[in-house]
Image (cartoon, grey):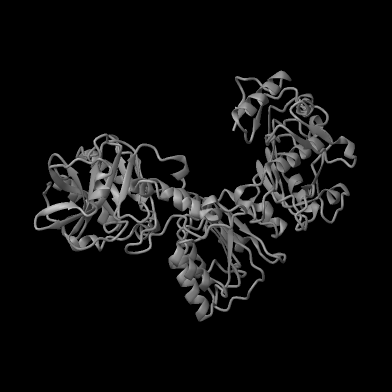
Amino acid sequence: MPVLLETPNFEFFSQVPHLHEAVDAFERVDAEEKIVELGKIFVKYNCFNDFGLTIVHRHFDMDKQEILVESINPKKTVAVSIPWKLEGGNHSPVDMDYWKSFGFEEKSYIVPKTWAFTSEKLEAFEFICNDTNFIGPDENFVKEVYEFLQDLGLLDIVGLRRLHGIGNSYETTPEGVKANVVKFGQVPPELQDDMIKVAWSFNEKGEMRGDQACIVCWSPWGNLQKSKMDFRPPTLRRPHLAVTLSEIVHEIVSFLPTIDLRSNVTHVSRGWEDATRKQLLSRVQVDLTPKNMAGYLELSKIRGNYHKRVFLSEFNFENPTPEESNLLENFTSTATPRITELRLDYCPPKQESVHTSVLTLLAHCPRLKFVSFSPKTLRIQIIKNSHATDVSFPKVEKFKISSTSRLDDVNLADFLRIVAIFPNLKTLRCPTLPQHIFEHFLSNKGMALQVGFLTSSRNYNVIIATFADQLEKLRLTAEYNFPRELVDSHDARVLVTITLPKVLPRLKCLAIGIPRDSSFSREGKKRLKAPALHLNFDGYSRQLPALEKIVVSGRDEWDRGSQDEMEEQDFFEMCAGFLAKYFLKGECLTLRDLKVPLHPGKKGRVEMFSKSRKCSEELGIGGLFRFFERIVTTFPNLGCETFEGVGDSGEAEEWVRIGCGIGLLEKNELKLS
């Protein structure tokens, strides 16, 4: 029986926050950016190989007279922490069979492993079995770390942990078991997106290195543990075997050992479910109004399924009703930590700054990258408002402002007050703002324009012409795809025509963004589509004498809607067709780089977007030679071809063979991304 070398505080473990609460508190104060400076203290006391930092947390509750004790198997491939019972001087695992199933050997001592800082001392709340008595952290080291965390306001959030000294590890909590299972090695690819980093260590230079992550599983004991992605799975078209033939599965699992059921089988469906839920939360935008927000918050509180993409509409942020105030307060305090994209039915009134209620909302979104002000109507503010000049959100990189009506009365000074709170903007989109505001933000070397069918072509042509003599990069993104028959008819009501200036002497890169919205109609029938964008230019040598790169690709991820996306085959046809119609003509001796999506299979079709259907080429692997030959003929000095995706290895080898055979690719320069 191992000897417990430190008297545990049984009451303290119940005060340790559950993982989702601890992580939320950690992220809310951007603690990871602050604790980097602690590395120099670990180096100063030469303890960076022995101790590290951790978010103070627990995964489940325990009964009184129980402590959490970790054991490591002899091969040092797995470590398991489970409750141990202390009665009458005897110390033993509560679930002895589960403990023995890992092949653990009895050790001589039980020593502290993880500590939290209290106002008086270090408080151990996790322990480990070991053959020798570990030496605890140096008192001066503890004092210095304590003072540092106290200055940062992190005493209740960050603690110390003893390092295994084995290497990288990841931790899971099996469903239905009071246990934390740590496996040593790299995180499996299928779990990487679901891991939450909870522990850190430092190297001899004081630099941080993340060495442990946790995946949260639901436990029937204590609170409901919030999985990083825990929400209702989608309805599957083809039910799983476990659903349609449950009696067979029941019979099969009756022959499996208990340890296999606990350690392996229970993870299978859960892993698929969590991965699917994560993808849906990342892709699907939830639209919340005063009418449906209460239901969303209640359901999300139970399941922990807070969306990453959120649109708040019909809220009066300037003068909310009592009901709206309560809803927004609850939403801000509970549903914001995971938000990466936030759209608001809001725009500051003329000569006013962003309202404090909106700033408060933004401040509670630590992962926010994209903000959009999309007011349905412009309200008249009743209460005057101003925000402090030092308010800023440096993590936001993309901002959009638009309205269903024109914002012609928005002046430049008002708009500058809005964007000033986002000091690190990389992308600014304002499709319905006046031209003078557009021009103020356009770079004299590069610009990106989203071409919408409701906007006059003249606006884009004037803006491009304004910077024609200085422009080096130009990206034109079609806002919509339309049925091919409308595009081929050159209907000015739906097709925006961009007429390039007579000469763009410095333009080196021309990029075209194409939407990925579905090629199926509401009736489920496939319809050929094309971007609602038409280009007019006379030729490479005259208009684009310095052109070095052409890119035809999909729209940016943040700019996509929630509609179904077309299949890769359809998207390739659309991109290749656009390339053929506008760019594979004449000769361009200056082009060195061409990027276009890779054909997803060995058969397909490239539509040349011509009125004559006879131009369509049926393309197998052999037919693609003709498509590539047009590329080589048009761009004889092309250095290499960069594709967006590659299928299986055999398919990739075939593409390389074709490219090299016609002089398009050189093996020493080939890039496949």
Tell me which corner region of the image, top left, top right, bottom left or bottom right, holds residue 204: top left
Count how many numbered circles sit on residues in the image: 0
Q: Is residue 502 above or below residue 352?
A: above
- Image coordinates of residue 629 in percent, x first then y, are 78, 25
Q: Is residue 62 above or below residue 265?
A: below
Tell me which corner region of the image, top left, top right, bottom left or bottom right, holds residue 474: top right
> Which residue appears at 48% of the width and 61% of the height?
305
> Which residue appears at 65% of the width and 71% of the height?
378
| Along the line of sight, the residue nearer the viewer: 149 or 297 | 297
**View extreme (bottom): residue:** 322
> Which residue appears at 67% of the width and 21% of the height?
657
From this viewpoint, is residue 37 visible?
yes
Tell me which corner region of the image, top left, top right, bottom left or bottom right, holds residue 314: bottom right
| Along the line of sight, the residue nearer the viewer: 392 or 553 | 553
From this viewpoint, is residue 270 visible?
no
Q: Is residue 544 above or below residue 326?
A: above
626 to the left or right of 59: right
- Image coordinates of residue 615 in percent, x first then y, are 87, 35
In the picture, the quarter occupied by the C terminus is top right
- Image coordinates of residue 533 in percent, x first then y, are 78, 47
- Image coordinates of residue 450 in percent, x first then y, are 70, 50
425 to the left or right of 166: right
200 to the left or right of 488: left
